[in-house]
Amino acid sequence: MPEVRITDVVTVAEWDHARGLGSLRVDVQTDGLAHRTDGGYRTVVRIGDDEHDGVVSPRVAAPTLPKPARGRNERPVQTLPDDFMDLLSIRAASAPIPPEFRAIPDLATMTMPTFGIAGTAVVERADLAVRPWSPETPELYDLSVSLIDPTGTEIDRVGLRVGFRTVRIVGTDLLINGRRVLFQGVNRHDIDHRTGRVVSRDRMLRELSLLKRCNVNAIRASHYPNDPHFLDLCDEIGFLVVDEADVESHAFASSLAHDPRYLLPIMERVSRMVLRDRNHPCVVSWSLGNESGHAPVHEAAAAWVRATDPTRPVQYEGAVGTDWHAGHASTDLVVPMYPSFAALEGYAMDERTDRPLITCEYAYSQGNSTGGLAEYWRLFESLPALQGGFIWEFTDHALDVDGDGRLRYGGDFDDAGQSGATMLNGIAFSDAAPKPAMFEMRGIFSPIRITSGPEDVMQGRLRVRSRRAFSGLDDLELSVRVDTRRGAGQETPIKLDLAPGSERSIDLPVEIVQHLTDPGVLAVTLTARTATSTIWAPAGTEVAVQQVVLPRAPLSLPIGGPARVAADGSIRHPLLTSPPRLSLWRALTDNDASFALDKRFVRSGFFALTPSTVDAEAEGDATVVTIRYATAWGEEIVHRRRISAADGEYRFDEDVSLPHGTRDGLRVGVEFELSDGFTDAAWTGLGPWENYPDRSDSALLGRWTSPVDDLATPYLIPQENGTRGGVDELELFGSAGRVRVQSATTLHVNVSRYTTEELEEATHWWKLPASSRTIVHLDIAHRGVGTALLGPDTRPVHRLNGDHYAWSWSLALAPEN
């Protein structure tokens, strides 16, 4: 390194949204000049066509008051008024300035002399004609800073990119460039399934590209400052970043922050983060750390950060952990973890509320989870003070140490004191492949939303709202189609000019309207794709799909004659390895087994149903079978089934009475197993990805097809997976033949290669044996998945609180000839 050089450049690039202009302050620090008194060094700051000089301050030889004059050779002339030193404190106190001071020119503005810090320069520019940076329009400008010696020679140069944006808190709103933004965020750790904590730049770009395509606009760097290259990418692609200091004491949160030995390390970790990352426009908030209690050191760190960088807010969950209205000295935002829906509503309506709330962690996603995300966003988008949050978390932390695809987690490495499956809590798998929860998130975070109902659509009108805060829809190509029982119709391009946050109605194309009265119409679907290629997606990448679901006529079920049943009350058929029987249990999800649910489902005893009596008798044109079951704890369940049959098709009218007082369950339905030889599935209902009652807002109604092997979601720890809701027709086919299920009311359908018992017994997905079996579950009721392992359970509307269920369905079995 040269002896005289630039050591740091600090930029403050802000955007005046009222005037549409930018301002820039550049502070330059040098090394090798702080001791020089001769001066003559300057800096040149260039941004675009703008170039401006700044003088490097020399060392001032005597930055003190002048020494008293001792000479008496001539009579001195008075240059200062009497009591001149009083002026300093009078001005500081904003006290009235005495007339004798006001009467003397220039003295009223006199203060103590100030000097620039030796070896530094400041350049300030106002009224710059630049475009603002935002997560939707991440405009960056190249800035260079040159150090020039007294001869005019450039002796050092630094280049960086700046974005002009302003972050302000006004009342209970956090504003970016003067606009309220909803934080559609995720928490992200440095983790790679092959390289562990060493994350390549290619992996970073792949992760950020996936998040951008799923409409995420914010990332919390949990729980340490990330690689500077990661922030460079966030600047370029467009993410709001909460930069978090590497301060966490977790189980020792109540003690370490109060220990004087940790005062300097905590301050150092916070300050180093700010000094390193403050030039990144993507960073919009500084976090003092995670789960480290609350102590005076946090107030001290917050004070230092605010003084050093007054352009961004400071946040810290520990300051509000027990009282959302407290902790002002340590946090400018209320950033709770895993809040309940009632708590969020209460905060928004509380008259004491004076800060924005952005959850630092919510929607805990371990295993088959993330239920209730749509409910969170109904609150975020409708109540004051609530501005979104950060889902926990982005990816699982499993490791593929041998490169054989057999992922491992805590306990697989002969490791003591590990936390088991706790690190398997992402909305993506360890290789960053999306889980179904990510598609739910993508739809909720969509840049557009249809606000019209089926009545408007049937009249040929579609009303759409832009959820963007800064940009229009010029970067998107939109198309619309009609989905029917036969499948998706032809897409028709449409034009939609929408300003940020605005809403308007458009006329649907004629070719769409003419199909709305077709038999079997299900929905009108609007799709948004990228119009041009970017660093994060090629042109034509799908980023949003929205639907208007139209009224669906119930299917008519066949009416046959009395069916032949076996002694156990079941039907027999060559395609049935196991005939339809009552099913009330699912392979427990991580949330189902949460300590907070207090073994609720095990207490039901529904995991083991033992038939006690079976009665069958003819009743009109059907056979009625009544089976009484005993639960694992001896309580009685009565399953009454009316069966009719004609030409290989069976109709079942089901009636199930659970023990009186049953207040929650997992599923109510039937299951059966088919013979080998079924490879493919088609269904009319919600899809194409797995969905559950409280995680289905983004699922699409249509006619879907899939290989049976692809219907499962391979959560590393096997559990309930692969269910699709809203289904009234299911077809399974292959070399063995064809099976068709129809229902008068919509069902939750699951087609799997594994039984519930096999899923519950396995510890890793890859330990499940290869299987060609086909096990089918048809549920009239299925519980939501919630987030009860760490956060709220599924809402009551998605729980099974009844003790009586009735429904009708049919089963057609056609062996291959």
Image (tube, rainbow, N blue to C red):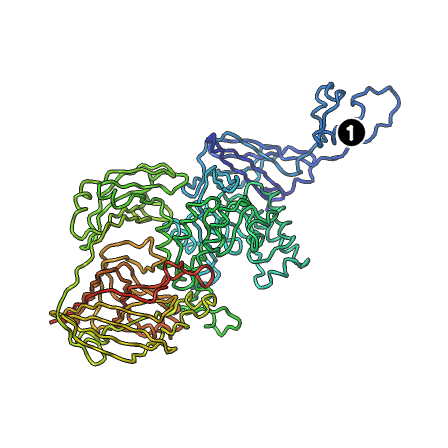
Residues 326 and 32: in front is: 326
Does residue 509 appear to the left or right of 183 in the view shown?
A: left
Q: Amino acid at mark 1?
A: Met
Query: Measuring 22% from the left and 73% from the top, which residue is drawn there?
Result: 674
Image spot of residue 778 (x, y percent): 27, 66
Residues 481 and 139: in front is: 481
Rendering quarter of residue 467? top left
Query: Measuring 66% from the left and 55% from the top, which residue is drawn there?
Result: 263
Instruction: From this view, report whether residue 186 is shown above or below residue 69.
Output: below
Residue 718 visible within the image:
no
Rendering quarter of residue 84? top right
Residues 60 and 163: in front is: 163
Badge 1, how many Cα within 10 Å: few under 14, some, many 20+?
A: few
Instruction: From this view, report whether residue 551 is shown above or below residue 178.
Output: below
In this view, which residue lies farthest toward the right? Answer: 72
Instruction: From this view, report whether residue 453 is shown above or below residue 154.
Output: below
**In the rendered view of the protein, which quadrant contains the C terminus?**
bottom left
Residue at numbered disc 1: 85
Q: How many marks?
A: 1
Residues 565 and 157: in front is: 565
Does residue 50 appear to the left or right of 515 in the view shown?
A: right
Image spot of residue 59 (x, y percent): 69, 36
Residue 256 visible within the image:
yes
Query: Measuring 51% from the left and 34% from the top, which residue is drawn there?
Result: 46
Does residue 239 appear to the left or right of 103 in the view shown?
A: left
Image spot of residue 143 (x, y percent): 50, 38
Query: Measuring 42% from the left and 65% from the top, which residue is drawn there?
Result: 591
Q: Secondary structure at mark 1?
A: loop
